[in-house]
């Protein structure tokens, strides 16, 4: 059921503390941690504590939490000192777009030039 923790979800296990992660920020609604396979000098995943399979379903079901996730990404960018040089917030949706964990999450990327269009 959407919103409820899923036993087979890696990110639900990180939220519960059953799987370790390098957490950089936690709030009532989100957890942010460093990506284990960084694609930029700063690469942090920002995830909602509630389980939804992708960003669109999160926004449809819980728009306040979706907004919290974006706000926290901006706060983390400032804390990581990449807000002045620029950063990117990416949501991959579906396996064809590179989504490998089907729990909504944003990639916060920065610390190097980010060309457009992205890969």
Image (cartoon, rainbow, N blue to C red):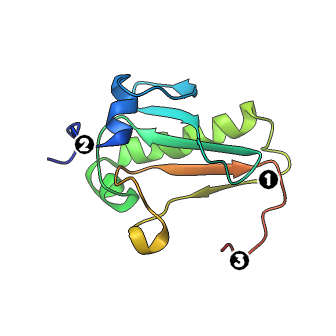
Q: Position of residue 43 (x, y in %)?
A: 66, 45
| Picture quarter with the C terminus | bottom right
Q: In the rendered view, does 116 fall on the left or right side of 72?
A: right
Q: Secondary structure at mark 3?
A: loop
Name the quadrant containing residue 100: bottom left
Q: Is residue 37 above or below residue 31?
A: below
Q: Which residue is mark 3?
A: 117
Disc 1 secondary structure class: loop
Looking at the picture, how far across and down is residue 64, in whole percent? Answer: 38, 43
- Residue at which label 1 appears: 86
* Contact? badges 1 and 2 (CB < 8 Å): no
Q: Is residue 109 left or right of residue 20?
A: right
Residue drawn at (33%, 52%), measured in percent from left and top?
Answer: 58
Q: Quadrant of residue 4?
A: top left
- Say which of marks 1 and 3 sits in front: 3
Nearer the observer: mark 1 or 2; the answer is: 2
Which of the two discs, 1 and 2, labels the residue nearer the N terminus? 2
User: x, y (%) of residue 90?
Assistant: 57, 59
52 or 38, nearer to the observer? 38
Q: How many marks?
A: 3
Report, in whole angstroms, how far the alpha carbon at label 1 lies from the one at label 2. Answer: 35 Å
Q: Compare marks 1 and 3 and give the one earlier in the sequence.
A: 1
- List the residue tagged with mark 2: 8
For the point 33% across and 32% down, the residue is 13
Element under disc 2: loop
Q: Where residue 96 sits: x, y (%)? A: 43, 75
Query: Viewed as shown, does residue 84 lie left or right of 102?
Result: right
Residue furthest left in the image: 1
Mark number, residue 46: none
In front: label 3 or label 2: 2
């Amino acid at each position: 059921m959407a919103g409820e923790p899923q036993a087979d979800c890696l990110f639900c296990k990180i939220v519960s503390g059953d799987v370790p992660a390098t957490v950089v920020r936690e709030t009532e609604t989100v957890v942010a941690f460093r990506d284990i396979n960084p694609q930029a000098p700063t690469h942090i995943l920002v995830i909602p504590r509630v389980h939804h399979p992708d960003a669109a379903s999160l926004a449809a079901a819980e728009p306040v939490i979706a907004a919290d996730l974006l706000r926290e990404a901006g706060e983390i960018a400032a804390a990581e000192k990449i807000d002045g040089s620029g950063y990117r917030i990416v949501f991959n949706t579906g396996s064809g777009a590179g989504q490998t964990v089907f729990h909504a999450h944003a990639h916060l990327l920065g610390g190097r030039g980010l060309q457009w269009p992205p890969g």
